[in-house]
């Protein structure tokens, strides 16, 4: 059981470039989440999904898009990266209303 | 405006002593609370939770206290160990199963 994995672990982008972050979980969890963590801000919810084929906006969704085509995968896309999107991104999943299981994070720098 | 606040960015405690991490919230609709622990370069891991029908929940060395009237919760670690050195996040939700709002975290250092 790998739990929650995130790809890539690190990435440097130039302003305007696009990229996709992949989150995968092998625990058959229904709920999946994308957060960003910034100094002094805690974890802020970007988008989430309550099941395959569903997505919803969180607290800070602007500039990001997501897709949940398969239950085990939750993709976070940046269409045109901006320096304000420099952050550490965490994916999480949970089986039902309960605590979340987090991935190891992706550190993204936008120059 | 942060709905969940952890006003101490950092805390240092001697090994064997008690660590007390505090969390305040402003949304009176929050009724389910969790603490997560995070080591560097890892994702947060769940530590302990409490619902608003309780004022205390205990799990080994970790105890969470909830004071609903003060909108305050605290995490007690007794005795503190060097391996407890990490960032601790408080999180709250309006109802069991709803999305969580996280505090900014408190970095705990347990000194040998």
Image: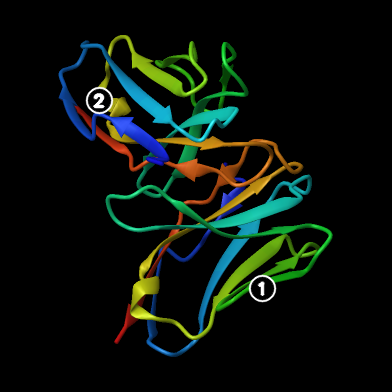
- Judging depth in this view, the residue of B100 and B7 nearest the camera is B100
Please give the label number shown on residue A83. Answer: 2
- Residue B14 relative to residue B28: left or right: left
Quarter of the image where one finds residue A37: top left
Q: Is residue B59 above or below residue B24?
A: below
Measured as percent of width and height from the top left, residue A92 is found at: 48, 36
Image quadrant in which you'd find residue B96: top right
Horizontal side of A101 relative to A15 (left or right) equals right
Name the residue rendered at 49%, 15% in the picture.
A68
Q: Nearer the viewer, mark 2 or mark 1?
A: 1
Chain containing mark 1? B
Front residue of B5/A54: it is A54
* Quarter of the image that includes the C terminus of chain B: bottom left
Q: Residue furthest right?
A: B53
According to the image, label 1 marks what residue?
A: B58
Name the element at disc 1: strand
Quadrant of the drawing holding the N terminus of chain B = top right
Question: In screen coordinates, is B66 left or right of A3?
Answer: right
- Which residue appears at 31% of the width and 27% of the height? A84
* Disc 2 to disc 1, C-alpha distance: 43 Å
Image position of A36 with respect to A84: above or below: below
Name the residue: 59% across, 42% down. B101
Residue B86, placed above or below residue B61: above
Q: Classify mark 1: residues with Cα within 10 Å, few (<14), some (14-19) or many (20+).
A: some
Q: Residues within 10 Å of mark 2 (few under 14, many from 20)?
A: some
Does B104 sit above or below residue A26? below
Question: What is the chain letter for disc 2?
Answer: A
Display coloring: rainbow
**Camera-nearest residue between A68 and B24:** A68
Q: Residue A48 at what x, y percent from top left? A: 55, 25
Residue B30, numbered label? none
């Amino acid at each position: 059981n790998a739990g929650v994995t995130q790809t890539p672990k690190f990435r440097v982008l130039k302003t305007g470039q696009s990229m996709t972050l992949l989150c995968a979980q092998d625990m058959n969890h229904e709920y999946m989440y994308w957060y960003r963590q910034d100094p002094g801000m805690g974890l802020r919810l970007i988008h989430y999904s309550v099941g395959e084929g569903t997505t919803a906006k969180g607290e800070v969704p602007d500039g990001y898009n997501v897709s949940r085509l398969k239950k085990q995968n939750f993709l976070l896309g940046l269409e045109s990266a901006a320096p304000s999107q420099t952050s550490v991104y965490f994916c999480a999943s949970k089986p039902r209303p309960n605590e979340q299981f987090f991935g190891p994070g992706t550190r993204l720098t936008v120059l | 405006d942060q709905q969940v606040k952890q006003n101490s960015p950092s805390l240092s405690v001697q090994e064997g002593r008690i660590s007390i991490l505090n969390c305040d919230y402003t949304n009176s609709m929050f009724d389910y609370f969790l603490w997560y622990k995070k080591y560097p370069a890892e994702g947060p891991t769940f530590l302990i939770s409490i619902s608003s029908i309780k004022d205390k929940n205990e799990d080994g060395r970790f105890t969470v206290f909830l004071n609903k009237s003060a909108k305050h919760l605290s995490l007690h670690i007794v005795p503190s160990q060097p391996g407890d050195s990490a960032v601790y996040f408080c999180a709250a939700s309006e109802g069991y199963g709803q999305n969580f709002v996280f505090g900014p975290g408190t970095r705990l250092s347990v000194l040998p």
